[in-house]
C-alpha cells in the first residue's frame, strides 16, 4: 500500500514505520493517524513482521504534536469524538499491539507526539530529543492518553508538573524520569534500536504477545493483572514455541521458535 504521510519498510523481520511530514515537523493530522492505523493493521497480519520500530523523518522531530488547524473550531462534542477516534485507531491500538513496538524518538515529541511515543511498548531517544505535553498552554488537555500514560510511566507528581507547566524536558531528564529506556546520539539511534529489536527476535514472539497482555492488564481498572498473567502463562504450555524452547534448553542448543 502507498502512503502520503508515512514511510513503511520491512527488513530482517523488523518493520520501520516513519512519520514523514518534515515540513510540519511530522505533526499528526487525521490522514496521518489513518495511515498509521492501516500500516499497523497490515503489520499485525503479516507473519514476516516480528517487531515494529516507529520513528519520525529527519533529525528535528519524532512528532511535534497534533495539527491544531484541524480542530481549532471544534465543539465539545466534536472534541470528544476526535479523542475517541484517535484512541481506537492509533493510540490504544498501538499500546495493545500484539507485536513489540519500539519508539525511536529522534527529536521533538510534543503533545500527540509524546502520546504516540508513550503508546509504544518502550522508547529510545536521541540526545537532541525534547518531550512534553504543552496542551494546557492552548486551553485544552492531552486527549490521546497523555494524562493516563504519563502518570503511569513517570508517576503522578512529575506528570502533574509536566502537564501543568506545559514545559519540555530533554532526553537526559526523560531518562531520569524513566520516560525513555535509553539515550543515544542521533547517528546511533536507529542502530541501537535495531540491536534491541534483534535481542527481542531471539525469543518467542508468541510468549512476548502474552507478556504484553499481562503487563498492560496491570494498568487497566477493574482487571486483575495476576489473573491475566496466570491465564497467559497457562496458554503458553500449549504452544509449539514452549515445546521448542524447553527442548532447546534441555538439549543445550539455541531455540528456533516457529512462532506458533
Image (spheres, rainbow, N blue to C red):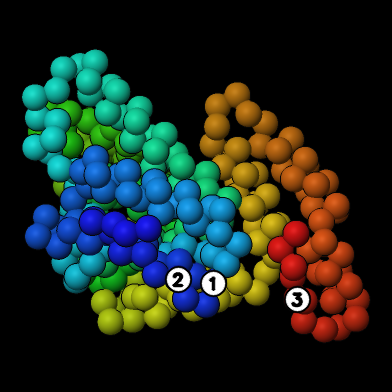
Point out the tag, 2 or 3, that comes first from the N-terminus.
Answer: 2
Label 1 residue SS: loop
Estimate how packed mark 2 is, as few (under 14), some (14 to 19) or many (20 or more) residues with alpha carbons within 10 Å: some
The reply to whether callout 2 and callout 1 are in contact (CB within 8 Å) is yes
Label 3 residue SS: loop
Horizontal arrangement in the rendering, residue 114 relative to residue 130 (left or right) = right
The residue lying toward the viewer, choosing from 145 and 96, is: 96
User: Any mark on residue 256, and which?
Assistant: 3
Alpha carbon distance from label 2 to label 1: 7 Å
Visible residue check, residue 131: no
The residue to which callout 2 is attached is 10
Estimate how packed mark 1 is, as few (under 14), some (14 to 19) or many (20 or more) residues with alpha carbons within 10 Å: some
Q: Position of residue 113 (x, y in %)?
A: 26, 50
Label 2 residue SS: strand
The residue to which callout 1 is attached is 13
User: Which residue is found at the position 82% from the left and 84% from the top?
Assistant: 253
Q: Is residue 150 above or below residue 122?
A: above
The residue lying toward the viewer, choosing from 44 and 113, is: 44
Visible residue check, residue 214: yes
Amino acid at each position: 500500500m502507498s502512503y502520503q504521510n508515512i514511510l513503511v519498510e520491512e527488513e530482517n523481520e523488523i518493520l520501520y514505520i516513519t512519520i514523514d511530514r518534515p515540513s510540519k515537523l511530522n505533526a499528526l493530522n487525521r490522514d496521518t493517524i489513518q495511515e498509521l492505523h492501516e500500516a499497523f493493521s497490515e503489520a499485525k497480519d503479516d507473519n514476516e513482521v516480528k517487531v515494529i520500530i516507529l520513528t519520525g523523518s529527519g533529525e528535528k522531530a519524532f512528532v511535534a504534536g497534533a495539527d491544531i488547524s484541524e480542530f481549532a473550531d471544534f465543539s465539545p462534542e466534536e472534541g470528544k469524538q476526535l479523542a475517541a477516534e484517535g484512541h481506537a485507531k492509533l493510540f490504544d491500538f498501538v499500546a495493545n499491539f500484539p507485536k513489540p513496538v519500539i519508539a525511536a524518538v529522534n527529536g521533538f515529541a510534543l503533545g500527540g507526539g509524546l502520546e504516540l511515543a508513550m503508546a509504544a511498548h518502550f522508547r529510545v531517544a536521541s540526545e537532541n530529543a525534547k518531550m512534553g505535553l504543552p496542551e494546557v498552554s492552548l486551553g485544552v488537555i492531552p486527549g490521546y492518553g497523555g494524562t493516563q500514560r504519563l502518570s503511569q510511566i513517570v508517576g503522578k507528581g512529575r506528570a502533574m508538573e509536566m502537564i501543568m507547566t506545559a514545559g519540555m524536558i530533554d532526553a537526559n531528564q526523560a531518562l531520569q524520569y524513566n520516560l525513555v529506556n535509553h539515550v543515544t546520539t542521533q547517528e546511533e539511534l536507529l542502530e541501537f534500536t535495531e540491536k534491541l529489536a534483534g535481542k527481542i527476535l531471539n525469543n518467542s514472539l508468541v510468549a512476548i504477545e502474552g507478556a504484553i497482555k499481562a503487563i498492560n492488564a496491570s494498568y487497566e481498572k477493574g482487571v486483575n493483572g495476576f489473573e491475566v498473567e496466570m491465564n497467559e502463562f497457562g496458554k503458553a504450555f500449549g504452544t509449539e514455541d514452549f515445546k521448542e524452547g524447553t527442548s532447546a534448553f534441555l538439549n543445550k542448543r539455541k531455540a528456533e521458535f516457529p512462532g506458533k
